[in-house]
Image (cartoon, helix red, strand yellow):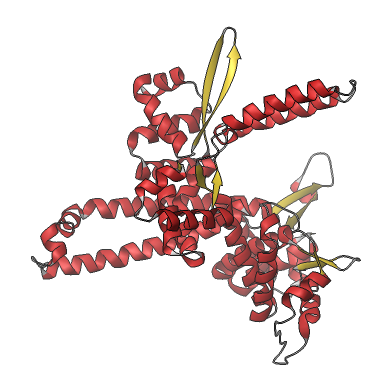
Amino acid sequence: MSEHTTALCCTILKDHFGPKITQIASVLMTKGRQTLSQLSKQTQMTTKRIKPLLFIMLQQNIVSFSEHEEGLKILTYYELSIKDVLLRSRFAAMRETVGLHFDEHCVEITELLLLHGRLTPQQAQKMVKMDQLTFANAFHTLIDGKVLIPVTLQDAITEMDQEIKAVEEAVQASFDSNKAPLSSLEKTKITKQLDVKMTDLPQSAFRINLNAFVLVFRNQKIKELAEKMINPEAGELMSAILQTVSTTSVLGEETSAPLHMSMLMQRFHHLELPVSGTKGLGLVHYLNLLAKTEPPILFESASGEYRVQTKKLVQELRARLILSIIHEALSVSGTRIWRLLRSMKKLEEKQISKIALMEEKTTRHCLYEMLKMGFVFLQDVPKSQDHSATRTTFLWFVDIQKSSQILLNNAYKIINNLRIRKQHEYATRTILLQKLQRSDVVSGETPLSEADLEQKLVFDKLLQALNTAEIQMEEQVMLLRDL
């Protein structure tokens, strides 16, 4: 974990929870999983003070725990979820997304769950101003839309322990497969044990499904990509296809669930999909166009089934992000060289200059600028054992995964600086902000002076610029890390 990631997590936690929880989280980030006594020693706080803070972090889904037997003792280790901490900076965007797809009652419930982390329906209903029927309909709508998911015991267990448990169960299953089949009495006993475990799960509590918002963002980006490659109608068709397979979509999937031609014809036969101003070409032509793009948006199998190439499209979106940054820094020359290296894999400097039809001086300048930015890399191929530079071939190549990681660290640094700048602007205008919150100023009884109005206008413009820049960087982070 880079220092920029740690700094951003501390900034977010300090903004949301204050210095004490930030201090505990900083220890968990730098030292790894810790017991309660270790946290007390590292933070110089008593265990009585740390326990309620850990409870808040568990309630907010940013800390998980694991229990281990050490001799006669059972020690509980706590671990911070870096991903969940970083996702907290997107709460405003999540609320906006819910507002676009659902009504105001769903937005109110979403705000409540984002604030409290996890709640039962009974607890949530007491905190909102809705009648029981309206609340029930809104709550079920969010569950059906996968915005809310039930809290299980697995949510509080660390990912590492979940993986270890899964491996142990798989090993145990392989041993058990060599034994004689279970009798009916043994099966009944195991079933009763499982039923008892299931009743222990807190199924009545719900939390926000953060992955659902990432999937919405991914689908929107794929739609925009189809619009750029073909036309807006192709984007609408891709949006409809992604909506159809949304129930089975998961993050990191290679391809989406298959869709047969007959089902597509049945669902989308009414759509008018023109190409180059000509109407009536039909759904089949558009599916063929989407399957022939580079890279192909859809994959057509021999049986007539179509799948969305989600993994390749995410890679293409990252490549386009890198190209946009290169174009801004080095214009067309840099993008031409980067595209060439991406298609030709590895080339020498002279080969790049010759194929790209560019001067060697310009080629060298662009290559070394992109090397400093982390968008191209060098591999040396020595011709002798002494690795002499004069007898070594240097090959330039592109690695989107490495470049994405470098961009991600830079994005963390920029977001952290933006948040620190916002905190500084709020701190320097404390008197103005206190004046704006006074009841007589809010009601209009005491008008602000011209100097205060001018200062407020400058502050609003600055805050809007900082928020816009932060949203843009958050979208980059989502593209580079979460998809």
How many tags in the picture? Answer: 0
Residue displayed at 16% across by 54% down: 431
x, y percentage for residue 30? Answer: 49, 31
Residue 176 or 91: which is nearer the viewer?
176
x, y percentage for residue 305? Answer: 84, 66
Where's the N terminus, which quadrant?
top right
For this orientation, the residue located farthest to the top is 72
Q: Is residue 210 left or right of residue 379?
A: left
For this orientation, the residue located farthest to the left is 446
Picture quarter containing residue 182?
top right
Residue 285 or 86: which is nearer the viewer?
285
Residue 317 or 297: which is nearer the viewer?
297
Q: Relative to 433, does residue 37 appear above or below in the rendering?
A: above
x, y percentage for residue 145? Answer: 57, 57
Q: Is residue 228 left or right of residue 59?
A: right
Residue 276 or 419: which is nearer the viewer?
276
Q: Is residue 39 left or right of residue 203?
A: left
x, y percentage for residue 244? Answer: 69, 65
Q: Relative to 295, does residue 251 appear above or below in the rendering?
A: above
Picture quarter containing residue 247?
bottom right
Where's the C terminus, which quadrant?
bottom right
Residue displayed at 57% across by 65% down: 325
Does residue 212 appear in this view? yes
Does residue 365 appear in this view? no
Residue displayed at 44% across by 56% down: 133
